[in-house]
Amino acid sequence: MPQYQSVGKLPHKRHTQFRGPTGALFNEELVSAQGFSDAYSLLYHVSTPTAVRAIVEAGPMPVREWANEVHRHHLFDTNKFAGVGGDVLESRRPLLFNDDIIISVAFPDRVGQAMYRNALRDELVYVGEGEGSLFTPWGRLRYEPGDMIVIPRGTTQDWHPLAGLNHRLLILESATAISLPARYLTSSGQFSEHSPVCERDIKVPELVEPRLDRGDFPVRVKFGETINIHHLASHPFDVVGWDGCLYPYAISARDFEPVTRRIHTMPDEQQIFETVGAAICCFVNRVADYHPLSIPAPPIHSSVDVDEVLFNMGTTIFGWKGPYPGMMTFHPRGFPHGPKPGVPEATIGMKELDLNAIMVDAARPLRRTHWAQDCDDPGYPTLWLSENEAAE
């Protein structure tokens, strides 16, 4: 899990009197996971974050399933949603889901008129394109392409994408905590020497000047498929200091150290995050397999109990020059998939693999949404036919 951080002004002892310049007590907020038995942080607000003027229902945000009984491989062109407009919530398009995770894309082009909070799920946001800042009670987290941002559930978010830039996000919502794989940590909680990232690679929020304005501050709170708007009496970003181990953070794919071997490495060796029911892997440029007879392309794979999703931001993947930024493939269990015809031969002799993708392995079968139907390429399952077979 993220390392302990101490930022801003704090009392010497937790849960003790801590007063501001006027003599008024700061409001201590305990944000904790698993009740009081897991990671937590203490935040010190100028005003109480519990003061709510009104709560109104904003309507449903349903995830509608694509009613199609034909189970097959899919290629989704998410670029079709690039012009939908809106903020990070309004532009969100869920494509795949099960009880554990929801996989969406978003193309925000503006700051939201209201802040946003996911009450039930942790979020992992991969920045495919775009730069900006994510503001939360913990402060400001600057982001850029390649960043993978972990946001604990219950975090009030205010996204500020830089104007004039295209923004493309891959968003994974998880019913359980998103964490770094336990095998990357020592018994004392430090990253091991075998981990692909270390403490220096974690970007944490920088504390900003507390917002002291009072008035009406709307926050859209997402409870599953329902959105409520909580009108707060004071701005939630009025924190003067915080400490703990539960906070938003980011790791850049550019800082991920890939595993290389003489022969092909399996995707799970490039894992970066995990959650109950899913593993998240990071594919970045790396040295190609260097056995004298190696085939850098992966073998054909029949995944008997895992669905595989790959979101690509490069122009090639393991020698296949067919993909393009924003392409997402969905290879469900029950069908073999692998390199396209001619790709294994074409990769022989390669010295480097040009990779820029995020992969999600789902333990439970994923279901497709109506948004997936809108960007699906129905001809993708026949892409493995040879030229002669395709002509027959």
Image: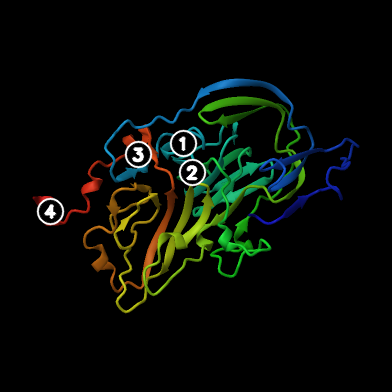
Residue of label 2: 171
Q: CA distance from mark 2 to mark 1?
A: 8 Å
Question: Given this view, does label 3 or label 4 mark the residue nearer the observer?
Answer: 4
Image quadrant occupied by the N terminus: bottom right
Identified at 74% across, 38% down, the residue is 238
Residue of label 3: 80
Question: Given this view, does label 2 or label 4 mark the residue nearer the observer?
Answer: 4
User: Foreground residue, 240 or 365?
Assistant: 365
Residue type for callout 2: Ile
Q: CA distance from mark 2 to mark 3?
A: 17 Å
Identified at 61% across, 39% down, the residue is 157
> Mark 2 or mark 4: which comes first in sequence?
2
**In the image, is 247 to the left or to the right of 89?**
right
Residue at disc 1, secondary structure: loop
Local crowd size for mark 2, using a 10 Å CA cut-off: few (<14), some (14–19), many (≥20): many
Identify the image's colour scheme: rainbow, by chain, secondary structure or one colour. Answer: rainbow
